[in-house]
Amino acid sequence: MLLPHLASSLYGTPLLLARTKLDIILAVLGSRIGWPESQTALALPQARASPQSLASSAAGIAVIPVHGSLVRRSMAMDAQSGLTSYGDIANMLDEAARDPGVAGILLDIDSPGGEAGGVFDLARKIRDINAIKPVWAVASDGAYSAAYAIASAASRVFVTETGGVGSIGVIAMHVDQSARDAREGYRFTAISAGDLKNDLSPHEPINKAAMTRLQTEVDRLYGLFVDHVAAMRGLDVKAIRATEAGLFFGPDAVRSGLADALASPDQAMTEFSAYLSVQRIHKSAARVISTTASAFTTTHISNQKEIHMNQDPASTPVPAAPVDTTTEDDGKQPKALPAPVVPAAPAAPTAPFAPAQGDPAVANDAISAASHAAGLAARAEALTIAELCQLAGQSQRITGFLAQGATSTQVRQTLLASRAQSEEISSVIHPDAALKANPGNAHDAGALMAAVKRLTQKP
């Protein structure tokens, strides 16, 4: 039987759990573990995805579900229990991090929170993986308490317009069932060693000393929670405490700084896909810059060696022309012989940049300027590709072209070839061609175009 385990995880233990969910849990398990029954309406159990069923999109985004009540260990309870363990989530994160086909990770969160034990370890893992592959999160529809501790570790947090985040607080419950024991003819007597061993027993009222100790632990965990959110979200500790563990919905979640933007799961996926595509372009540009910088460094070192091996002609003394002392018959003055030819210094090889020799600062400035220019070029290229697709009425192909690393010239040729094969050929592309060609996808195309523009605009 797993009920004793569940009971020990619920009473006398600090929880990072929304109070409304705690009431539901009591309504389900109360009578079975000796707690008073609650009149709270029951929620249907939610099936959760298997840890092995990692969903991946064509854009290389792994979607990891964070659903239901969160526990350190699920104790082999099935999906209908509504429990998700931190261990299962960690395993899915590790799998996505290792998968070369995954470029980014999206946490799909719908959870009231759960146990405190293990949540901060999982959050730190998320932040560590984020340094390798970007991790985003969407609260669809709720990321409360422990679930928000997980969401806040992502580099970007979305919330749906009907969703909410927050409940940055800690709660612990103690049940005193001594009166019920008496009615049923039971009286429990604890024989223990150690004055604190019988603290928080449900068979007797809680004493003040035990309550103080439990409150101390609740306060300690609350401090950890607040500091964690402050560090992950870049918020002031006082501002987080001022929320008083409240819930923030829709636009209020964004205004409070607990979320970055409003978005449905599909919209979050679209923006994430566009972001990853731009990142691929930037990485390609970075490789070009790295190669160029390496070539410059090699040439610069070679130049320095040449300078040391060949003296400056201006400083090389030219031997005086030898004098012919032979007296000629015509009585002319002695004549000078032709001066020896001094070989000129070899010309320095042409470098990718033209900094002053021996000046690393100038070289660094040149490389920095090239890096900045490459970044601007990458943004412009991505925006050009998006606009070409939209004008051609094929906005759905933006993500694919960006993911392939295609150039705007290649995209233009592909779109023209595609158009030539269509039934109707027109030499003029109407500005509203995208909407006319795919009227049902007008909203999605606009959202994708907006995402590309946001990601390619100059920071």
Image: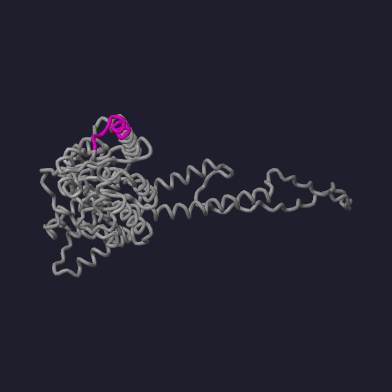
Residue 213 among those drawn in magenta? yes
| Whole-percent x, y for residue 433 in the image | 15, 57
Displayed quadrant of residue 178? top left
Q: Which of 22 and 254 is in front in this view?
A: 22
Q: Which residue is at a point 43% across and 55% down the rendered structure image?
A: 287
Tell me the quarter of the image containing the C terminus. top left
Q: Give the range drawn in magenta.
A: 204-215
Q: Which of 262 and 184 is in front in this view?
A: 184
Q: Nearer the viewer, residue 117 or 379?
A: 117
Tell me the quarter of the image containing the N terminus. bottom left
Displayed quadrant of residue 59? bottom left
Q: How is colour applied across the structure in the image?
A: one colour
Answer yes or no: is residue 302 visible.
yes
Q: In this view, does 359 lie above or below 61?
A: above
Answer yes or no: is residue 236 visible.
no
Q: Which residue is at a point 50% across and 43% down the rendered structure image?
A: 364
Q: Is residue 49 above or below residue 312?
A: below
Q: Is residue 436 left or right of residue 203?
A: left
Q: In this view, does 87 lie to the left or right of 425?
A: right
Number of numbered callouts drawn: 0
| Whole-percent x, y for residue 455 in the image | 29, 47
| Whole-percent x, y for residue 316 in the image | 72, 45
Q: Which residue is at a point 48% across and 42% down the rendered structure image?
A: 365
Q: In this view, does 456 lie above or below 427?
A: above
Residue 219 among those drawn in magenta? no
| Whole-percent x, y for residue 187 in the image | 22, 41
Q: Main secondary structure of the magenta part?
A: helix
